[in-house]
Structures are given as structure tokens and as C-alpha cells.
Amino acid sequence: MTERFGPEHLEAWRRDGGVSIHDFFTPEEVAAVVADFELVFGRTEGAAEGVNKKKQGEVGKFNPAQFATLETGPFECSTALNLIGVHPALVSFAKQALRADHVHLYQCQAWAKFTGDADYDQPFHTDFSNHTLTVPSEDAHLNAVTILCYFSDVTDAHGAMHYVARTDSAKVAGPEASLNKDPEAHRALQEALRPYEQSSAAPAGSAFPYSIDVYHRGTNMTAPRGHRYAVMACFKAASNDAIAFHAWAFHHTKPWARIFDNATPEQLACFGVPLPGHAFWTELTLQRAQLRYPGWDLTPYREALVLAA
């Protein structure tokens, strides 16, 4: 696998809290994921016109319609979409960004947006309040990295995420300002951040890693009959219990065999599955795991057990 990113991208992520990386995924990978999006969501087009319910001067709002086509895997489709969140290049970026030997995928969602389905405009916000019960660390490596992956060409007319680089938002307020629920303080924060906002617009196959303390917002879909296909993959250091979102076992009725039957041990480790050689693996746990996932190739785990004996 050719290198998908360079030291300059990691440095930009650490400094600014976000960076756009074009051509992160190959055209073949993009095409396979797009086919799965079309299968899962059953649509390729939105309406001729977008929805904008804001009043003059009003900042964007969150509403349930924005998230109606946000799905958590596993999915009833091929391995392309099911394993894209643990693509080796994403895992590699997360490990290097967080300076961790092992990382866990604690959130992964496919989000299809369609023109006219909702008013997608949002206020600037940070993600730490629903990714941790505390606050962002001053050390970026103790936080997390969310990687927004675009699998369709995304312009500002296709709802590109807008963000404010950490170096710019520091001129306005720290991430804790997003906790203030006072309407006037909220409006003042939005107005102060707006001059610094940048667009993450990029062609299909691009990735945008950002941190949980970065101000960002969703924008409206205005492209006639437009769609936006994106995947969000969130990683933390495996030892960091302060960060969380999904409890994967809560979704046990989803088609997990599509992942277990096709993922590598390192990819499964991102979901919290112990690596080969871990003390968890015994003859009995291997037998039970095989019963749960008959198609799972447990050879690496069995071989490590023999070597440890």
C-alpha cells in the first residue's frame, strides 16, 4: 500500500486540529464504497432544491432530520463499506497522530446527505461533550482523532463541513465556550468564529482528520439533486478510557460476521478484540468464538496459542 499521507499532514493536525488530505483512497476503493452507499441507502439523488428554514440573521440549528440518514455499521452490504473505517491507512494515521502503538475505533458511521431532506446548516460546535465526560486534554495525544472521509465529490453546494483551525479559534475562545447555553453568548461566539471558518470541500477519496476540540459545523445541501456520501471514523489510544461513544456489543444484532469473516487481527483489534497471543485466548475461548462466527479464520489466534504453550 502506497503512503496515503505525509509528516506535513500529521503536523498540521497537531497544530491546527484539522487537515484536508486529497487522494487518501484510491478510485477503486471509492467506487466500491459508493456502490455500498447506494445499496444501503437506496438513493443517489436528492431534491431539485435544498431546505433552508433559518430566519434572517439566525445561526444554524441541530434538528433530527439532519441525522435521519446517519447509520452505524455493520451494514448489509459488501466488505468495502464495512471495513473502510478500519482501512490500514486510517489506522496508521490514527496511531501516528496519537503516538499510540494500539488504537481503538470508538465511533464509525456512514452519513448520506441529500439535497432537500433537511436544513443541514449547523452552529459551530466541538465534539468533546459527547465523546468524553470530561474536557479535551491540553495534550492532543490524550484526546482522539475523527477522520471524515468523503466518497463523493463535495463542494460547498454539497454540504462541505466548515471548521475553524485551532490557531484561529484560540483568538476567539477555547473549546469550553461551546458549553455556554446562554443565547446571547452563543450568538456572540458564532459571529466571532465565522470570519475564520474554512471549508473542507474536497473531491471523492479525500480524508479530513480533526480533533474533538475543533470548532466545526455542517452546512446546507444546495446542489440540485445532490448527495454527499461520507464516513466518520473516530480513533483513540486503546488505553484511553476517558474517550468513548459506541459500545459495539450493544449493536450485536447487526451483521458482525461481515466484519469478523474478512478483517485482519489488527483491524478487529480496533473494535477491542484481543490480538493473537493475548491471555484472553485459550482453547475454550477459541471454540466459543468459532461458534459465534463460524466463518472467522482464527488461524493466527490458534498459532499464537501454540507458540505460547
Image: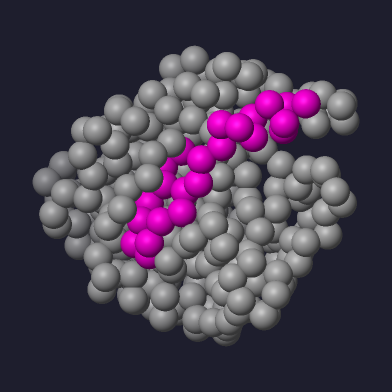
Q: What residue is rendered at 45% in x and 30% in y?
A: 17
Q: What residue is rendered at 79% in x and 55% in y?
A: 63
Which residues are drawn in magenta?
188-210
Displayed quadrant of residue 215: top right
Can you give x and y, in whole percent of width and height, for residue 130 in the image? 66, 38
Is residue 100 visible in this depiction of the protein?
no
Q: What residue is rendered at 16% in x and 42% in y?
A: 308
Displayed quadrant of residue 187: top right
Magenta stretch containing residue 191, yes or no? Answer: yes
Can you give x and y, in whole percent of width and height, for residue 247 in the image? 58, 49
**The C terminus: image quadrant:** top left
Can you give x and y, in whole percent of width and height, for residue 129 in the image? 67, 32
* Camera-side residue of 134 and 282: 134
Whether 280 is drawn above or below 243: the answer is below
Whether 307 is drawn above or below 102: the answer is below
Magenta stretch containing residue 2, yes or no? Answer: no
* Camera-side residue of 265 and 309: 265
Whether 162 is drawn above or below 226: the answer is above
* Camera-side residue of 183 and 31: 183
How many tags in the picture? 0
Displayed quadrant of residue 68: bottom right
Can you give x and y, in whole percent of width and height, for residue 36 in the image? 44, 78
**The N terminus: image quadrant:** bottom left
Is residue 228 visible in this depiction of the protein?
yes
Q: What residue is rendered at 19% in x and 57% in y?
A: 300
* Camera-side residue of 3 and 190: 190
